[in-house]
Amino acid sequence: MGSFNASFGEGFILVGFSDWPQLELILFVFISILYSLTLIGNTTIIALSRLDPRLHTPMYFFLGHLSFLDLCYTTSTVPQLLINLSRLDRTITYGGCVAQLFIVLALGSIESMLLVVMAFDRYAAVCRPLHYTTIMHPLLCLTLAIAAWMGGLMNSLIQTSLMMAMPLCGLHYLNHFFCEMPVFLKLACEDTEGTEAKMFVARAIILVFPAALIVGSYAHIAQAVLRIKSMAGRRKAFGTCGSHLLVVSLFYGSTIYTYLQPTGSYSESEGKFVALFYTIITPMLNPLIYTLRNKDVKGALKKIAGRGRNSG
């Protein structure tokens, strides 16, 4: 670690999208708009879940956590990306890079675990409707939320510690717009198969295992929905779960592609565009998905807007 600190003490240069200078202005405008929509949308969801008594339910309690995570996740990468695209500064210190790596891994891991909790909530709502309020009582909801946060932080701490223990060498360039794990691994200057295997297992546990639990819960939900005889009841059940299932597909599809492929086959150019999807587009879409597909949220939004007009 001594030689590493001496070599990389000055930090790194984030290449970002400088390989495509003709795209930088377009991306700057596009990402600025998406980031603004992300801030507005997720802040609105958090505010509505706090202000409207009808949304004081387990589903919206967890949705508030998801929106807060999305706000933190985008803010940990996007402002730096906008500075990078404006060509003002492409550098990041070693300490800043490690901190960003830890934060991004932690928030992503927490979201993965939180989506499992939300799937369990939907399972209880559809498959155990008569016992739903008994099962999803406030203390259990709080415990599940704390477990998701602690589990994600521990996973990030393990992976970041393993990454910092690797000797890195080569140029001070990271071919990405933030300190991303697969790009960091490419700087390893000795055989790190053992460490990479441990990190792969940690990533698989935090992605594959939760995804399998979600698939299992939705298999039970599908069976329960098919037993409902009325079409109105089926539509209500699908509406309850459809938005969550769409969010799950967007999140796991992009993150599994990035984190569960071998380091040798990871394409840095493709990785940057895939990272745009799960760091910017998905957090921006989440509030829209829940708002457009959910009558409760739309009703709360109209109610708050009506209050604003009346007070004005």
Image (spheres, rainbow, N blue to C red):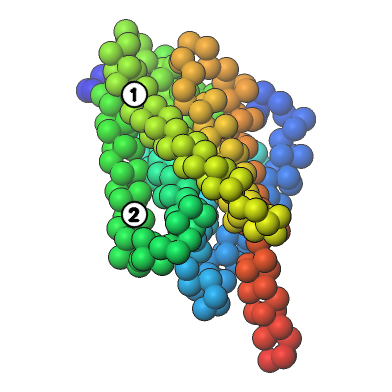
Q: Which of 169/73 is in front?
A: 73
Task: Say which quarter of the image contains residue 145.
Answer: bottom left
The mark lying in front, picked from 1 and 2, is 2
> Which residue is rendered at x = 32% and y = 11% of the image?
193
Q: Which of 191/83 is in front?
A: 191
Q: Does residue 86 appear to the left or right of 76 in the view shown?
A: right
Check disc 1 and give the amino acid type: Val
* SS of the residue under disc 1: helix
Q: Is residue 302 above or below residue 105?
A: below
Q: Which residue occupies the extreme left position in the image?
A: 2
Q: Is residue 173 above or below residue 31?
A: above
> Which residue is rendered at x = 64% and y = 30% of the image?
273
| Residue of label 1 | 201
Q: Position of residue 75 (x, y in %)?
A: 52, 51
Badge 2: few (under 14), some or many (20 or more) residues near its Cα, within 10 Å?
A: some
How far is disc 1 from disc 2 in space, using C-alphas? 23 Å
In this orientation, does residue 253 appear? yes
Q: Which residue occupies the extreme bottom position in the image?
A: 311
Q: Which of 289/193 is in front?
A: 289
- Indicate the quadrant containing the C terminus: top left, top right, bottom left or bottom right: bottom right
Q: Position of residue 175 (x, y in %)?
A: 54, 24
Q: Position of residue 259 (x, y in %)?
A: 47, 26
Q: Position of residue 8 (x, y in %)?
A: 36, 25
| Residue of label 2 | 144
> Which residue is rendered at x = 61% and y = 30% of the image?
274
In this orientation, does residue 91 appear? no
Q: Is residue 165 above or below residue 80?
A: above
Task: Say which quarter of the image contains residue 116.
Answer: top left
Q: Earlier in the sequence, mark 1 or mark 2?
A: 2
Q: Are marks 1 and 2 in contact (CB under 8 Å)?
A: no
Task: Say which quarter of the image contains residue 105.
Answer: top left
